[in-house]
Image (cartoon, grey):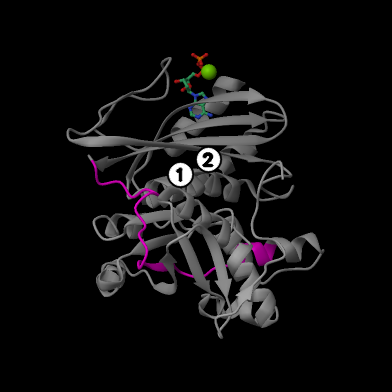
Amino acid sequence: MEFDLIESLRRGTHLDRADVALGIGDDAALLEVPEGTQLVACTDTMVAGVHFLAGTPAEDLGWKSLAVNLSDLAAMGAVPMWALLALTLPDGDPDFVTRFGAGFARLARMHGVALVGGDTTQGPLAITVTALGSVPRGKALTRAGARPGDAVFVTGNLGDAAAALGLRRRGATPPPELVERMQRPVPRVAAGLALRGVATACIDVSDGLVADLGHVCTGSRVGAELDASEMPVSATLAAACDAVAGRDLALSGGDDYELCFTVPAARAAEAAAALAGVACRATRIGRIVAGAGVRVLDSRGQPIVLAHPGWEHFA
Ligand code: ADP
Ligand code: MG
């Protein structure tokens, strides 16, 4: 049974890559790492009831479990190459696995990512994906390079996914555009590549903008100011709630998988042009300052205190 499931995943996700010397089927995969590059590795787990609601379509789980990992690679400026998948399933429902594999494969193909291994066990539904990619040696985007005076940008819109989750939790039916953003986030892989050599620091927004920019501040030993009135919010979100609620979802909702990055103020136009070249919009939302921590300012420059600054396990 387990082996039928693995075989179904292998077939459903198959993609030829010359750098996979040995893929699914042996004790471990053998991968050729390109000369002059660093291997970039990340992993993320999704647990039923914690990271997704019961009843989420299997296709969407397959897509999202890979998407959140490709988002981490994007935030490093890495080219995605390979993935491993550890699946814990309550029962060996072959239909679930087929549909999960189809969602996973759809995104994997878009980025030429080969599934090269994993593990399949029985237990409460949980999905762990490990993604591997590469970056030219020394060129990765980290959280450590932001400097006072840098401009802070974010790609796309914020708050849509958190709004969808909030509406679902209250028993309401969210607009389909918001559900799409929650269940099928699009990792900003091309944007991450375009920002190499321009951005001084980069992070993907998963826990919430304020919390994640806070990680950049810690990593770079600087502070940041965010202009709350500059938050990029979709028309759908703006129509679904009042302006303050939309702004707060953008600042702290999380699950956005947009890239928040810093760039020297003199190179802001260059960064925007690099992103425009990959059809990605970015909004200037604040600045890096000396000090520590993130301050959120209203349109008159007065500090705003957020009720829920971000998502944290074990809080
Ligand atoms: P082992 O007992 O040596 O760990 P397994 O029976 O767990 O081997 O796995 C057999 C092969 O199938 C391995 O190559 C493994 O990487 C692959 N595999 C197992 N589960 C998955 C999965 N969910 N997705 C992709 N590959 C998998
Ligand atoms: Mg195993």
Whether tag 1 and tag 2 are in contact, CB under 8 A, the answer is yes
Q: Quadrant of residue 238?
A: bottom right
- The quadrant of the picture occupied by the N terminus is top right
Which residue is found at the position 42% from the left and 65% from the top?
288
Where residue 244 sits in the image (x, y, percent)? 67, 79
Where residue 139 sits in the image (x, y, percent)? 25, 46
Q: Quadrant of residue 88?
A: top right
Above or below, 189 against 49 in this view is below
Query: Quick check: can you spot residue 159?
Result: no
Query: Would residue 184 appear left or right of 39 to someone viewing this image?
Result: right
Where residue 44 sits in the image (x, y, percent)? 54, 39
Above or below, 246 against 185 in this view is below
Q: Amino acid at mark 2?
A: Gly
Mark 1 CB within 8 Å of ligand 1: no
- Residue 101, label in figure: 2
Residue lying farthest right? 171
Taking the magenta stretch, the answer to whether it contains residue 156 is yes
Label 1 belongs to which residue? Answer: 105
Which residue is found at the position 29% from the left and 55% from the top?
193
Above or below, 255 against 150 in this view is above
In the image shown, does 230 or 147 lie closer to the viewer? Answer: 147
Residue lying farthest bottom? 300
Q: Quadrant of residue 201?
A: bottom left
User: What secondary structure is the stretch in magenta mostly built from?
Assistant: loop
In the image shown, does 289 or 9 lie closer to the viewer? Answer: 289
Q: What span is colored magenta in the figure? A: 138-164
Query: Would residue 311 appear left or right of 287 to someone viewing this image?
Result: right
Helix, strand or loop status at disc 1: helix
